[in-house]
Amino acid sequence: MREQDLELLRMRLGEIKSMGWIKNRRPGNVGGVGNTLEDLLNVEENNRQLPDFGTWELKSQRSRTDALLTLFHSEPEPREAGIVPRILLPWYGWPHRQAGKRYPPNERSFRQTINTLAYSDRGFTVDVDYDEQCVFAEFNWMAVDARHSRWLEGVIAAAGKGDIEPQPCWSFGCIEEKLRTKLRNLMYIRAETKQRGGAEYFKYNELEAYVDPTLENFLELLECGKIFVDFDARTGHNHGTKFRIERGAVTDLYEGHIRV
C-alpha cells in the first residue's frame, strides 16, 4: 500500500510541478504554501492523527525559510488536567499584546518554543526521562531573565517556586504511537517563492520522501536540541501544543530516505 500510494502521489506532484508558478490560494496565511498544495491535491486541511494522502503525511515549506517544521500536535498529559488552559495560561501566562484591543482586556498568552539545551528567558525547558519513560516540560524560577521579574512575582504568587504541578509530559508510548500512525511515511515538499503584482507565487520542485521514523531517533534529536516543544495558546484559543524539528534534522529522524 505504501508503494502504491507513493506512486500515485509522485504522479500528482509531478503534475503540480509541471504547472510552474502557482498563486498562493491563502494570502496572508503563513501556512499558505501547505494550504495551496493541499488544495491542488484535494486534501482537506486537518489536524487528524492519520496521514493526509493515503498512507503518506504531507509537509511543505518555503525553500528559503529557516522555520521549524511541525511534526505533530499533542497536548501534554495528564490530559484530564487540561494543563494548557487551566494551569499554564492562568498561572504562567502574561497579558496578550492585543489585550483590550483585538481581544478582551483579560486576554492572556502562553507562547514558548523550548528544547533540552537551555532554559527559555521565562525559565522553561524540556527533559527526557528514561526512568519515567516520559518527556517533561519543566520550570525553574531561578532561570527567569531579570526583564521578566514582575511576571515572575505573579507566577510565584499563583503557583509558588516549585515546578509545574501537575508537570506537563508526553509518554514515550504516546510519542511512538504518533510516529507510527501519523508520520510513518512522510513526503516533504519545498517550494520556491516569488512576488508578482502584490501576490505570492509558489513553484513546488523539491520533493523528498522519508519512511520509518523510530522513537530512538526522536529521543536522540530531542536530547540534541533539534526537536522542540512549542506551546501556542491564548485565553480565547489554544492553537495546539506541537513537536517541531529543525529542517536539516528530518533525515535523522527516519530510517529510510527516498529522492522523488
Image (cartoon, grey):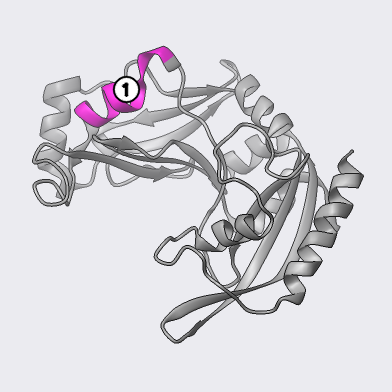
Prevalent SS, magenta region? helix
Quadrant of the rendering where the N terminus is positioned: top right
Horizontal and vertical percent position of residue 40: 66, 60
The picture places residue 110, in percent across and down from the top left corner, at 28, 39
Name the residue carrying label 1: 164
Residue toward you, 73 or 3: 3
Start and end of the magenta stretch?
Answer: 80-91
Secondary structure beneath dot 1 equals loop
Query: Is residue 252 part of the magenta span, yes or no?
Result: no
Residue 166, percent across and down?
Answer: 36, 15
Q: Is residue 22 above or below residue 165?
A: below
The three-letter code of the residue at mark 1 reads Ile
The residue located at (91%, 46%) in the rendering is 3
Camera-side residue: 51 or 8? 8
Q: Residue at x 79, y 54 (%)?
A: 209
194 left or right, relative to 105 = right
In the rendered structure, the answer to whether residue 227 lies left or right of residue 238 reads right
